[in-house]
Image (cartoon, grey):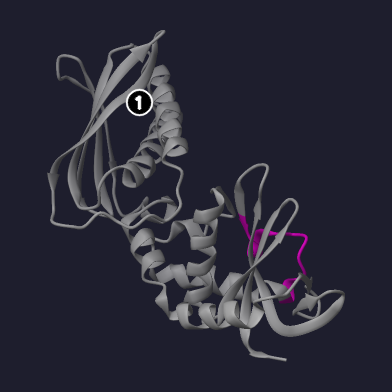
Amino acid sequence: MTDARSEELTALALEILDTLVVIATPGWTELSVTIDRREGKAYAHSVVALEKQRRDARPELGLDLGEVRAALDEALGELDALLGRSELASLVLHRSSDEHVVVAALAGDGRILVEQTLDERFYPYRVYTEALFDAALAAATIDEGQRALSAEAQGHDDWEYDARTLELQLKKGVLPWRVYRAQVIATWAKESETLLWAWANEELPERSKSLSIAARDSTKSHAGLGALRRPHLPADEPFASALARLAAARVGAWAVYPAVYESGVIYLGVLRDQR
C-alpha cells in the first residue's frame, strides 16, 4: 500500500469515525454499518450497536444529524472509490476506548478489504469524541454567570464591541447602557455554517484573542478536545454556541455574549467585572 493511499485511508477512517460517534448511542464498543448502493454509489443503510456499555443517551447539543449522516455517506463514497472494487458491503468498528478504534471495511462475503487502526496517535486530530461531548455538557462553571448576564442584559436594544479596547457595550436606543470587558472566543458564519476560532482569525487584534488561545492551549493535556485546536470546522449555530461556551468555561470567562449580526454571530467571552 502506497503512503499516499494509506494516508487517504486514514483520513477517511477518521471522518467516518467522527460521524459515527455523533450518530451512535454513547457507550458502544462495536458498531456495524451496512451499506446500500443506489446508482452505483455507496450509502449507509443502517448503523447498529452490537455491544454497548451502560450509558445514557447524551442530551441534545445542537448537531444537525441530517448533515452528519450526509457527511458519513460522502466519506463512504470516497472510501468505495478508493478501494475501486465496488465490493464494499459493510463496516465494523471495534472500540476498546475513546482513544482506540479499529475500522474494518468488509466485502459481502465477509472478507476484510482494508483495516485501519485509529489509536492514541490520531486522537488529537479527531473532532467528535466522547470526551468533547462530556466536556461540553459538563461546562457548568459558566452557568451562574450566564444567567446573571442574561438578567442584566434583558431589555437592551443593540451591542457594540471594540476589539482594541476589549469593551462590549450594550445599548438602549443609541446610548451605552452597560459596559463589560470581553474577548472574542469565536465567530460563526451563517452562510457557510462554519465556526472560526478567534486564535485563527487574522483580522482580529492579538490582544482580543488571549482567551481563545488559552482555551486552545488547555487541550494539550486533554487530547479528546481536538475541535478546539482545529482553526475552523463546520457547525450549525446551536453546536457552535455549545463549543464557544465550552471554550469560555475552560479559561474562566464569566459568561458568553452571542453578538448576533446579519452574517452570523461573534461569541464574546465576558470577563467580570462590569464597568
The residue lying at 34 percent from left, 41 percent from top is: 17
User: Residue 35, percent across and down?
Assistant: 29, 21
Is residue 3 among the parts visible in the rendering?
no
- On the image, which quarter does residue 275 sit in? bottom right
The residue lying at 41 percent from left, 76 percent from top is: 140
Q: How many marks?
A: 1
The residue lying at 66 percent from left, 47 percent from top is: 190
- On the image, which quarter does residue 205 sit in? bottom right
Question: Does residue 172 sit above or below 12 in this rendering?
Answer: below
- Crowd around label 1: few <14 · some 14–19 · many ≥20 (10 Å): few
User: Residue 78, percent across and down?
Assistant: 44, 24
User: Residue 189, percent across and down?
Assistant: 67, 50
Q: Please name the amino acid that badge 1 sits on.
A: Met
Q: Is residue 249 left or right of residue 59?
A: right
**In the image, farthest residue toward the front:** 155
Residue 205 part of the magenta segment = yes
**Which residue is disc 1 drawn over?**
1
What range is drawn magenta here?
196-207
SS class of the residue under badge 1? Answer: loop
Question: Does residue 54 sit above or below 85 in this rendering?
Answer: below
Residue 155 part of the magenta segment = no
Is residue 67 among the parts visible in the rendering?
yes
Q: Please identify the quadrant where the N terminus is shown.
A: top left
Residue nearest the observer in this picture, 235 or 216: 235
Residue nearest the observer in this picture, 65 or 28: 65
**In the image, farthest residue toward the right:** 174
